[in-house]
């Protein structure tokens, strides 16, 4: 069952998300000697990343991946890699550059996704058990940090998009995103569902209906609702909480 925590404001939610992420990474290192972390972009996780950078004492056993990326150069203001570098990667103690696996958005959606597919299959060696709707075991991330769009999209998997039907590939190119820029690279739904833990951070009243849809019946109209509920931790501020009186 999904664990939902609501905090009074966005700053509190960011702190809680950073603490949850650090705990998940420590657990992975303790249990398997390594932690595979995937990061999302957007404005929402900026403070959480800054806090997570110092929350984890050492990053020397962490492999950093990305949930999605816009097809722009890494220095572009819309680059998810740039956000992660500025807020987390540059100051993370013990994080070697070869442990940071950047999606190469500048290659375009098709070539960029194909390149990352190869890197994921070489770098993620521990399989996760197949679940209902998944055709075969899929390599497992230890933690995927996710945001949610007002339309309940997750990563660059948008409502009713053909990408939601993919069952074999780990990484997909997107050429027609309804949210600019149109060209993107994204992890697939099977890979997100195989993650040992997904951490969703949502703040602001504009996310309230999306969170409600995510926690409702699974539907392609709300891609976030297709995540594995028993592996999902949701951290909200009160503004994004659709049922504040229930907690």
Image: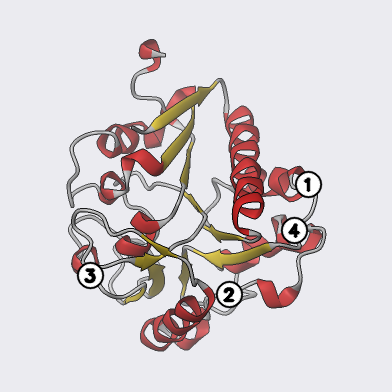
Q: Earlier in the sequence, mark 1 or mark 2?
A: 1
- For disc 4, the neighbor class at 10 Å (few under 14, some 14 to 19, many from 20) is many
Q: Determine whether, in the image, residue 12 is placed left or right of residue 188.
A: right
- In three-dimensional space, the C-alpha distance between marks 3 and 4, rounded to whole angstroms, equals 33 Å
- In three-dimensional space, the C-alpha distance between marks 2 and 4, rounded to whole angstroms, equals 17 Å
Q: Are marks 1 and 2 in contact (CB under 8 Å)?
A: no
Location of mark 1 (residue):
54
Q: Earlier in the sequence, mark 2 or mark 4?
A: 4
Between 208 and 231, the residue placed more toward the observer is: 231
Q: Determine whether, in the image, residue 28 is placed left or right of residue 138.
A: right
Horizontal and vertical percent for residue 184?
Answer: 40, 73
Which mark identifies residue 102? 2
- In three-dimensional space, the C-alpha distance between marks 2 and 3, rounded to whole angstroms, equals 22 Å
Identify the residue at horizontal 71%, vertical 55% (top origin): 87
Q: Secondary structure at mark 4?
A: loop
Q: Determine whether, in the image, residue 72 is placed left or right of residue 99.
A: left
Q: Earlier in the sequence, mark 2 or mark 3?
A: 2
Q: Secondary structure at mark 3?
A: loop
Which mark identifies residue 166? 3
Looking at the rendered structure, the number of numbered marks drawn on it comes to 4
Which mark identifies residue 59? 4
């Amino acid at each position: 069952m999904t664990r939902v925590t609501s905090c009074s404001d966005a700053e509190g939610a960011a702190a809680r998300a950073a603490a949850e992420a650090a705990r998940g990474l420590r657990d992975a290192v303790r249990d398997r000697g390594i932690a595979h972390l995937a990061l999302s972009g957007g404005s929402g996780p900026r403070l959480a990343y800054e806090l997570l950078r110092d929350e984890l004492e050492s990053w020397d056993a962490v492999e950093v991946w990305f949930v999605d990326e816009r097809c722009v150069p890494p220095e572009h203001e819309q680059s998810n890699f740039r956000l992660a570098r500025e807020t987390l990667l540059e100051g993370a103690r013990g994080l070697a550059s070869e442990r940071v696996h950047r999606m190469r958005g500048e290659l375009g959606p098709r070539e960029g996704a194909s390149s990352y597919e190869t890197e994921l299959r070489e770098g993620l060696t521990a399989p996760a058990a197949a679940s209902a709707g998944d055709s075969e075991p899929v390599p497992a991330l230890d933690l995927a940090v996710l945001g949610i769009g007002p339309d309940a999209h997750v990563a660059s998997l948008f409502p009713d998009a053909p990408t939601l039907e993919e069952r074999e590939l780990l990484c997909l190119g997107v050429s027609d995103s309804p949210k600019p820029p149109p060209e993107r690279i994204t992890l697939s739904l099977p890979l997100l569902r195989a993650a040992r833990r997904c951490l969703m951070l949502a703040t602001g009243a504009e996310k309230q209906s999306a969170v409600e849809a995510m926690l409702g019946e699974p539907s392609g109209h709300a891609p976030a609702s297709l995540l594995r509920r028993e592996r999902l931790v949701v951290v909200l501020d009160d503004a994004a909480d659709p049922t504040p009186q229930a907690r």
